[in-house]
Each structure stands twice: as C-alpha cells, then as structure tokens.
Amino acid sequence: QEMDMDIGSYLRSERISTAPYTTLTKLLEKWGTIQPDREAIVCYSHDGTRTSITYGKFYNDAVKLAKGLICIGVKGGDYVGIGGNNTPEWMVGTYGVLFAKACPVYFPFHDKSGDGIKRTLTKVGGCKAILFDPGLGDSHWEVMQRIAQVDQNTGGVLQSDIPALKWLIALSPIGSHEGFPTIASIFCDDNTELPEIDPEDKAAVLQTSGSTGFPKVVEKTHYEFVKYGEDYAFLLDVDIKKDSGTIYYNDRPFFWQGGYPGFVMVVGGTRVTQKTTLALSSYSEIVQFTKTIIHKEKPDCGFFVVPFYLEMTGSEDFLWKFRSVIVSGQPIPPICFEGKGKVYDAFSALYGSTEAGMIAGKIYRSSEPRGDEIIGMLPLAGMELKVVGKDGFVVPRGSKGELYIRSSPQFKGYLNDPEKTAIVLDSSGWYKADDFCKINSAGHLEVLGRVSDVMQISGNKITPSFIEAYVKRHPDVMEVVVFAIKDQSHADDVPCAAVVRVDGSTLTEESLREFIKRELNITEDAKFTENVYVPRHIVFLNDLPRTSTGKSDRKAVKNMCLPKT
C-alpha cells in the first residue's frame, strides 16, 4: 500500500522559459535593423504632448552615445547613474551605457535634497558619470547642483562627495543653461570599437521599493531582464516569435522592475507610457488621463497596479477592451475578475519583487469557466516557492507563513551590503520574501501581505490588506493604508487607517467605522471582534505619500498619522 505523503507548502515551476539567451543590446540591434521605422517607445506628457522614438533611431543614437561615453573615459565595469522620467532620451541613455559595457544605476528625483541619490551612488561605488533628465522647470537640474559642482560648459565635475564621479550630462537640454552638455552633444560616429557583451554581464542596479524602509540596491544581468520580458509575454499570451506588432501600455517608471522596458525589447513591440503620473495633482486626474491615452493608442495589452486598474475599469466611460492585462503591485482582490469579457480577454495576476524578479503568476481567460473565489498564482519559469513557519520548517498546505523563494537566475544579495543580505538569503539560496502567504489546497500561491505588516490583535494574525479590502468597499473611499500602533497597556496592536476620500465626499470617521461593522456583519455575541477588524483611529488625508515606484509608502503614512491618533 502506498503511503499518502503530504508534500507541504512547496511549489516548483514545471514550465521551461523560452527566453533567448542573449543581451538587451543584441535585441535592440535586431529590431533596429529589421524594423527601423516601428515606434519603440511612445511617451505622453501630462499636457498631452506625444513623443516617440523608432527602433532605427533608438539603435543608432544608443551606439553613437556609447562611443561618446567611451571617448570621455567610461569603460566596461564602470557604473553610470541615470535619473529622470519616462522619455525616449532615458532609453537612449540606458542603452548607450549598456553598449559601452557599463552598468546603469537608476534613481528617482523624489528626494529634493539629493541626499538619497548621493547615498545610493556612494554605496554602489565606481560611478563615473550621471545622465539626468532636467525635469519640469529644471527641478532635477537643481538637485544635481546639490550633488556636484560642475563646469557648465563641459559637464566635468569639479567637486562632489560621490567618489569617482567625473561627468554630469543632461539627457535633454536644460532650459536655463542651453550650453550645458547633453547626450546628443557627445554622440560620436567614428570607428570607435564597441566591447563584446555577455548575457551574464550586469545590466542595471535597481533600488528596492523602500515601502518598509530605506531602499537597498540589487544588480541585474542582461539575461535576467530578457527572462523577465519572456515572463511578461507568457502572462500576456504573447508569442515572442510572432507578435512583433504588440502595442503595450505600462505607465510605471522605467527605473522600476515592473516598468522596465524589457518586454517590448523581447517581442519588438511598442511601449506606450506616461512621462510621469506624478505630474498630475490628483488620483482621479491620473486615471482620466490614462483612459485618454488608451483610447487614443488602442494597446493590445496592459500592465496596471491594483488601485489604478480598478478605478479605470470601473468607469462608465472606459470603452477599450484589452486582449490581455497584467495586474500586480499588492494582494489582488477577486473584484478584478469583474472585467472578464468586457475589459479583457485574458487577465493575469503577477507577484514579483526587485530581489527575486517575476516570481508567480496565473492567466485567467474569459473563455474558461472560473470557480475561484480568490486570485491564486503558480510559480513562473525557474522558480521554487515554499511557505515556512516561525520554526523555519515548511508548513502544511493551507497554513499561513512566510514565503521563501529560490530562483534561476538566482538572487545573490544586495550590492555591497553583506549584513542585509545575510538577513534575507540563506546558505541554500532561499530568499526570505517577508511576505505572508499560503499555498491553498488547489496548489496556488495566495499572497496575503507583508510579514512585517502583519498585526497581532488579541491572539489573531491580521494583515492590513484584509481590513483594507473592507474599507475599500465604501464608495467614498479612493485609497486606504491600514497600519498598527501599540496599545501599551496590553502590548497588543491597534488597527488604524489612513484614508483618501473621493473628491467632494463628506465621509466621517464614525460613518466609515459603522460601514465597516455592517460589512463585517458582526453578531452581538461576537462583538469583541470589532477590536480586531475595525480601525480604532481613522485619519483622512488628501493624498498618500508614495515610494519612488508609486507604491503607498506605509512607513511614511504611519509617521504622518501618528500625531493624529
């Protein structure tokens, strides 16, 4: 008689990646040669201005920039900082650095003092140059001047706290300093020989989201980005050997892993994006502008984070149907399925991280019957997943615990940060994701929230996302972040909520609390559970602070609300 073995909460992908073993530069060379007139990138500014670049121009400009960078001393193994919005020039800057066999280090400009940029580039070390977008009203240029003293005729650095920094070069002209060097001004079209590049060469240094603390940095190779592009193609139902005409909408920042333009480079498609969503003053304006772009460009596929997707597709005036969409960024609620057959033909949930890449996902097609009450996912190609308890051992199926991930290519740790690496990476290559998950009876991964966010209330483990889901049911709630403060009298967590109301709403703390109670449908003999699920303090904000990747910054939200609780 065979013994029925419980394999526990462990999953391994059975799918083999079809990603070509190549470099990002080889892919650009390919598309720049065989379809030079096809638009590679289409960017919309918040005033409605549309700019684009074709594959042919993109390739030619990137090669000329690479030769120019080599001529000013940038060589293989050097790092080059790149900061700015989603623009064609950002793309040329990135690939110019890659063709020179150097490695881009991406950073945002949300830190006006420049201290965060200096901290990141100093930590990485060996940063020879910075390519930067001047920003609206030259706001980024002002930050750059706090980072380094520079000769404004040559771009040569005269003094800086960043070791090895020699050059500042603008991605596009600076309005207040027309003579300052730009990438176009250092283009070189001579016989300078470009170095050979291997798929395992480093292609980027990315920052983690910073949603729970100061961002760490992670190196990625050319092949990792190519593989991520293939993962996107799989989840979008796109054949990478046939679908070179795909138009793809994704407004996430290029410097964020979820917004990095790897997918279009793998398939030779067109990426439609916004220069920056943060230029608009309100959430509703961003969504309205997004709908306008989509109605104009008619993309086949799209990538969205949950709040934007729900707000956009719930609008009566949203009139476009995607062939396929990916929704990601946080625990994904089943309400996303309501667009089936109307908003999309195929819907994919995606779970990923800067460290481990594209981890798990699943396609839900309109043509297939669905009985799922939750949105579960399966490991993507090259991924192993396990859920462990506090003792470090795998928990039974259906039990909750922390997710561990082992991947190929493997996450090797945070750059120049062995202490933080040792906390999250064990000797067997398992990365501790700090995410609270379970593998259900169907063998699907359910992501429940961050381990570090899990609240301990009266002996119960409660994730903020659970309470957030009930708060979001109120029609006057646009966004919510739930966090905990300690009740010093009995060392219990007290749930609190920061809420952004829809424009014109008069929603009060008490009326929202009563609404949550009704939605929970708590009986009289279980009234104490209100202490577990109903926020004791609700703070109304005009907007939520965000990380550089657009996620709600939970730490900043909590710090902002503490004086009011």
Image: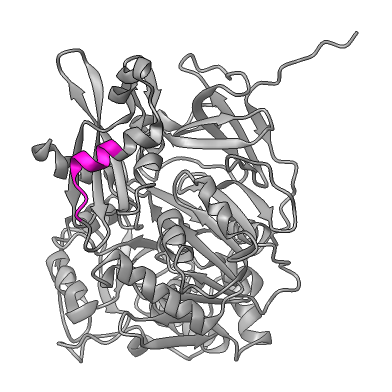
Whether residue 225 is visible to the viewer of this picture, yes or no, is no
Q: Residue at x 65, y 21 (%)?
A: 8
Identify the image quadrant of the C terminus: top left
Residue sitting at x 45%, y 79%: 293
Q: Quadrant of residue 97?
A: bottom left
Q: Nearer the viewer, residue 531 or 453?
A: 531
Q: Residue 233: give x, y in percent of width and height.
A: 65, 62
Residue 22 on image: x %, y %: 65, 64
Q: Is residue 453 above or below residue 256?
A: above
Residue range (magenta): 506-514
Q: Which of the pair 13/485 is nearer the observer?
A: 485
Report the residue at 31% width, 71% height from top. 285
| Relative horizontal placement of residue 361, taking residue 560 as reference (left or right) | right
State yes or no: residue 507 in magenta.
yes
Judge left or right: residue 288 versus residue 444: left
Magenta-drawn stretch contains 68: no
**Residue placed farthest to the right in the image?**
1
In the rendered image, residue 73, in percent from the top left (x then y), is placed at: 36, 73
